[in-house]
Image: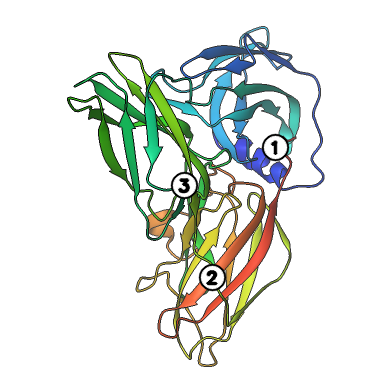
Amino acid sequence: MIFAALVLALIALGSPMATHAAGASCWADSYQLAQGENTGVYCTGFSPLTYVNVYVVEPDGTAAYYADVKSNASGEVAFAWGNGVKNVYSLLLGKYTIVVQQLGLADQVMYSDQVEIENVGDGDHVAGAYLSASQEVYDITADSVTLHGWGFMPGEVVTLWIQKPALCSSYTSHYVDGNNGATFENIPNLEIEGTYQVDDIKADSAGAFTTVRNFGSGACLGTWRYAARGNTSGWGAYTDIALTGPAVSTNAWITTNKDMVGAFNDTIQFWVAGFGANETLNCWTTSPDGRAIAFGLPSSFDEIKMGPDGSGIFSLTTGSYIISPDDLFYFGDSVTPVLSEGSLGVWKMTCRGLASNTTAIAEYTVYGYETAP
C-alpha cells in the first residue's frame, strides 16, 4: 500500500521507542539549495525491485508523505528533490530531512537512511530602492498592512514577495463528531511555501507605489518579510513586520487527560466545564507558530455542545487521515495518512461559548522525533 509506510513512519514520530534501521545508505548531489534549485537523492542497500517509502520532515518537525520509489535490480534508488520554482516560490528556510525506508513483514522497517538538505536564501537579496510599512507591529484581527515603495524606475512593474515566519509550516485541521465528541476527519493542509510571489504592481511616474495587504485570521504569528523588486531595473528593497494576536482571558475550564500527545495517530481528551447549559462552543487550536485552526464548526453536524450542567468532553486524534466509524458509506473505514499534526511543541485548545462568551484554554505538547525511525 502506498500509505502503509507513512503510517509506520508517522507513528514512529510520536513514539519514544523509535530506533534507526541500518543497512541502507543515502546521499545527495547538493546539501544546500536556493530557490528553484534541485538535487538528486540516491540510495543503495535496499532489496531489488522493491517499492521504498519516502517521507519528509519539515524544519519544525512536521512529517509529510513524499513518494513511493521502486528500487532497481541492484537495490538502488534515485529521485529528485527541489526547493520550489525559480521566481515563483521556495520552501521554508531551514533544514529538511528526507527519510527513505523499506518495510518488511508486520510493517517493520528493514532498511532506512536519511539525507538532510538545507533551504537557504532570505528573499532580501535586493537593493537600490526603498520599501516601508505603515507600522511595525500588526494585530491579526484588525490591522491591514500599507506598504510604500519608491526609488524604482517610472512605470516599471514591481513584483512583491512575502516570506513567512521560519516555522510557519504544514498542519492538520480537524472535524468533530457532534454526537460523541470524537474526531472523525482530519484534513492535511500542505503549506510548503516559505517565500512566494504575491503581486505585480506598476510604479507611478515617480517610480513609487502604495498597496494595502491583509493576512487573514489563519496566518502564523511572528515576523513576516515583504520584498519588492523592479522587473526592469532590478532595484528592490524589503521590510519586516511583526504579526501579533489578541490576548485571551479565561473564565471557564479545560483539562486534558495527559500533558503530551504523539504527532500522529495519538488521541488526547479535553474535559470542559463552566459554560452555559446546552451551550454550543466555538473551539480552535493554536500551533506553536501562532496559527489559529478551527476545531469543530458551530451550527453544523460537528459542533461541540455542552450538557445541561455546562460541561462536556471531546477528543482530538493527531495527524491527517480520513476515517469515520459513523458514516462508512461516505468516508469508508480505512485510514489514509498524509501528514503529522504539525509543528512540534506546545499547542493550545481554546473554546468560547457562543451565547455566554465564556472562554477556556488548555495547553498540551505535541511530541515526536525530528526523524524516525
Q: Which mark is residue 44?
A: none
Crowding at label 2, few (<14), some or many (≥20) Cα neighbours within 10 Å? few
Which residue position is annotated with label 1? 107
Which residue position is annotated with label 2? 248
Identified by mark 2, the residue type is: Val
Camera-nearest label, 3 or 1: 3
Camera-nearest residue between 158 and 48: 158
Give the mark, 1 or 2, whose residue is nearer the N terminus. Answer: 1
Camera-nearest label, 1 or 2: 2
Image x and y of residue 46, in percent: 71, 17
Camera-nearest residue between 134 and 28: 134
Q: Residue at x 50, y 83 (%)?
A: 306
Residue 163, placed above or below residue 346: above
Camera-nearest residue between 142 and 26: 142
Give the CA distance from mark 1 to mark 2. Answer: 45 Å
Give the CA distance from mark 2 to mark 3. Answer: 22 Å
The answer to whether any part of residue 323 appears in the image is no
Which residue position is annotated with label 3? 136
Quarter of the C terminus within the rendering: top right
Identified by mark 3, the residue type is: Glu
User: Do callouts 2 and 3 mark residues in contact (Cβ within 8 Å)?
Assistant: no
Q: Is residue 370 left or right of residue 288?
A: right
Q: Is residue 153 left or right of residue 130?
A: left
Give the mark, 2 or 3, whose residue is nearer the N terminus. Answer: 3
Give the CA distance from mark 3 to mark 1. Answer: 51 Å
Image x and y of residue 31, in percent: 64, 15
- Report which quarter residue 45 is drawn in: top right
